[in-house]
Amino acid sequence: MTATPPLGRVRAWLAPPRPADVEVVDGRERRLLVTEILVVATVTLGLSGLRSLVSLLDSLAAPVPLASRQVSIDKPLATDAWVDLAAQLASSLQLVAWGGLGLYLLLRAGSGPRAVGLDGSRPGRDIGSALGLAALIGIPGLGFYLVTRALGINLTVVPSLLDDHWWRLPVLVLSALANSWAEEVLVVGWLLTVLRRLGLSENRALAVSALLRGSYHLYQGFGGGLGNVIMGLVFGRYWQRTGRLWPLVGAHALIDVVAFVGSALLAGKVSFLPGS
């Protein structure tokens, strides 16, 4: 077997061809797929993107700079501790259901978990890839956040404002897992598969996926939006080239667990983390 030249490998990552076994639809099936995208986006992450844009506009309209305003990801949803626990669990369940919806639609279209890389065929390599992706995105991502906050184009993000209940850390871990499952299944596995069937090139589909990911993080500011667009480009291209979704779910979960739990444990003790 002839080894692929380095230049060829670079081109394969920058402009990969659409898989040959993908059937591009037209006519009624195409209209149904476009409707599917609009409906799923409206009830899930697309609506979150619209709400994030409204939140950013509200922050920009305030008399104080963006960096002087705080925004949190996990915050109390009720006054009573037990009611708050129930609300937090319900919120995570919603995210799990969103990911389940994307997987169900793939199954209905003839694709199963294996088709998007949600099988157990290579657990060791998937774990290693997840750790590598988490480091690739998470470490520079922290520096990017600090720079954009210093430039005044990002809000101060407090990952967790949950009160110190006995269930706080397990709920934060569950929230991280639910977020990663919903986002990667919907924005990568489901959306990129559907866009392939509509005939979009891999690069155009990747841009749509990354912009959607950035849109629902705009509540954090311009830095949060741009940073997640970059993450979307890296994660989406990894899936397009490898077909493996578990590494993305794992990497995203690890990044969020470190952010959520670290914020809860280190708030007020580390200079760049505001006190809760």
Image (cartoon, grey):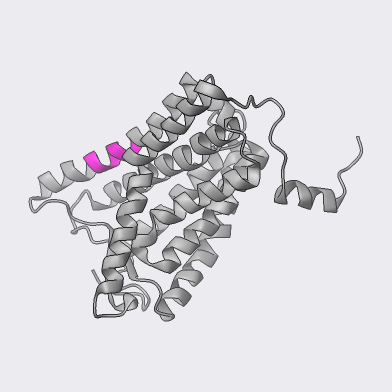
**Looking at the image, which residue sits at the far front?**
27
Camera-nearest residue between 75 and 231: 231
- Residue at the outermost left position: 80
Answer whether residue 93 is magenta in the image.
yes
- Residue 223 left/right relative to 21: left
The residue sitting at 8% across, 54% down in the picture is: 79
Q: Is residue 93 visible to us here?
A: yes
Q: Indicate the position of residue 141 as horizontal and vertical percent values.
A: 50, 65
Q: Is residue 19 above or below residue 108?
A: below
Helix, strand or loop: magenta stretch: helix
Tell which of 76 and 124 is nearer to you.
76
- From where the camera sits, is residue 117 visible? no
Asked if residue 88 is positioned above or below residue 35 in the image, the reply reads: below
Residue 96 percent across, percent down from the top left? 34, 36
Q: Residue at x 50, y 60 (%)?
A: 138
Q: What stretch is highlighted in magenta?
A: 90-96
Q: How many labels does the image show?
A: 0
